[in-house]
Image (tube, helix red, strand yellow):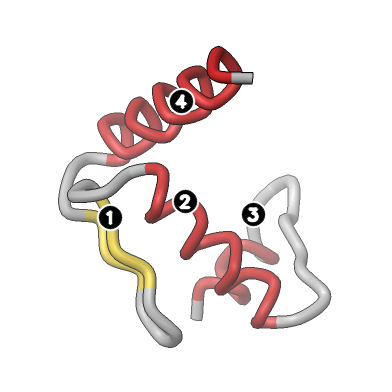
Amino acid sequence: MLMVELSHRELPIEYDTEEALIDLCKAMAQMAPGAMFAGFTTVELDQSTANVMSAIDAATKEYEESK
């Protein structure tokens, strides 16, 4: 489970509920369409982690510039 794996990192990432983590993953998937998918029980990366992060970074910058 992703929530458990995140809690075992050197610097743990913890969420109060699974729903909070699911919502975050779904939001990230919307920022990186075609690069990742997030459902209620799975998160799938269709590209490398670096490409997914680049897509999310680009979407974030585009949003900030549109303000």
Q: Residue at x 17, y 53 (%)?
A: 46
Q: Which residue is mark 1?
A: 36
**Would you say 48 lies left or right of 7 here?**
left
Whichever of labels 3 and 4 marks the residue nearer the N terminus, that label is 3
Q: Residue at x 66, y 82 (%)?
A: 18
Whichever of labels 1 and 3 marks the residue nearer the N terminus, that label is 3
Whichever of labels 2 and 3 marks the residue nearer the N terminus, that label is 3
Q: CA distance from mark 2 to mark 3?
A: 20 Å
Whichever of labels 4 and 2 marks the residue nearer the N terminus, that label is 2
Q: Which residue is mark 2?
A: 28
Above or below 27: residue 3 = below
Secondary structure of residue under mark 3: loop
Q: Which residue is mark 3?
A: 9
Q: CA distance from mark 1 to mark 2?
A: 8 Å
Asked whether disc 4 touches disc 1, contact meaning CB atoms under 8 Å apart, the reply is: no
Q: Residues within 10 Å of mark 2 (few under 14, many from 20)?
A: many
Q: Residues within 10 Å of mark 1 (few under 14, many from 20)?
A: many
Asked whether disc 1 touches disc 2, contact meaning CB atoms under 8 Å apart, the reply is: yes
Please name the amino acid that badge 2 sits on. Met
Above or below 19: residue 61 = above
Residue 20 pos. (x, y %): 70, 72
Whichever of labels 1 and 2 marks the residue nearer the N terminus, that label is 2
Please name the amino acid that badge 4 sits on. Asp
- Residue 19, quarter of picture: bottom right
- Residue 65, quarter of picture: top right
Please name the amino acid that badge 1 sits on. Met
